[in-house]
């Protein structure tokens, strides 16, 4: 299956619109759970830089979920 190119700007727009649409704890908690499952499943295929970045994102989601 060919995947179309997706630019950084489009991804940042997705982040922005997602942040505006769902600023509630359940959304952050759901995303954190998904990320943890993804990392558990894919950790063997990731390089250290990608792993560290996604763990950092997980920390931000964790903090966002606790603040609400």
Image (cartoon, grey):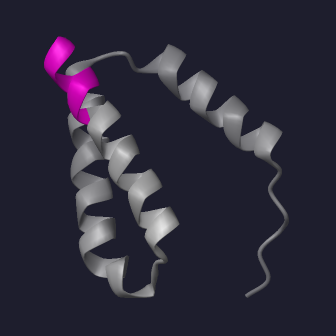
For this view, does 65 lie left or right of residue 22? Answer: left
> Residue at 27% across / 22% down in the picture?
64
Image quarter of residue 14: top right
In the foreground, 64 or 6 = 64
Residue 3, horizontal then vertical, whole percent: 77, 74
The magenta stretch is 62-67
Residue 35, image x, y percentages? 32, 56
Residue 37 placed where, x, y %? 24, 66
Against 11, residue 62 (above or below) is: above
Tell me which corner region of the image, top left, top right, bottom left or bottom right, holds residue 23: top left
Quadrant containing the N terminus in the rendered view: bottom right
> Which residue is at the far left?
66
Q: Residue at x 36, y 87 (%)?
A: 44
Q: Residue at point 33% right, 32% down?
A: 60
Main secondary structure type of the part rendered in magenta: helix
* Residue lying at the far front of the rendered structure: 48
Within the magenta stretch, is there residue 56?
A: no
On the rendered structure, is 1 left or right of 58?
right
Q: Is residue 18 above or below residue 41?
A: above
Q: Quadrant of the C terminus?
A: top left
Residue at left offset 50%, top offset 64%: 50
User: Relative to 32, is 3 on the left or the right?
Assistant: right
Residue situated in front as seen by the camera: 56 or 3: 56
How many marks are shown on the rendered structure?
Answer: 0
- Image position, residue 53 (x, y; %): 46, 53
Q: Is residue 27 above or below residue 51?
A: above
């Amino acid at each position: 299956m060919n995947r179309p190119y997706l630019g950084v700007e489009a991804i940042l727009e997705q982040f922005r619109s997602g942040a505006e649409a769902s600023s509630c704890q359940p959304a952050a908690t759901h995303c954190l759970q998904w990320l943890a499952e993804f990392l558990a499943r894919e950790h063997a295929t990731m390089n250290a830089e990608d792993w560290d970045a996604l763990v950092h994102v997980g920390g931000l989601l964790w903090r966002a979920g606790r603040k609400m």
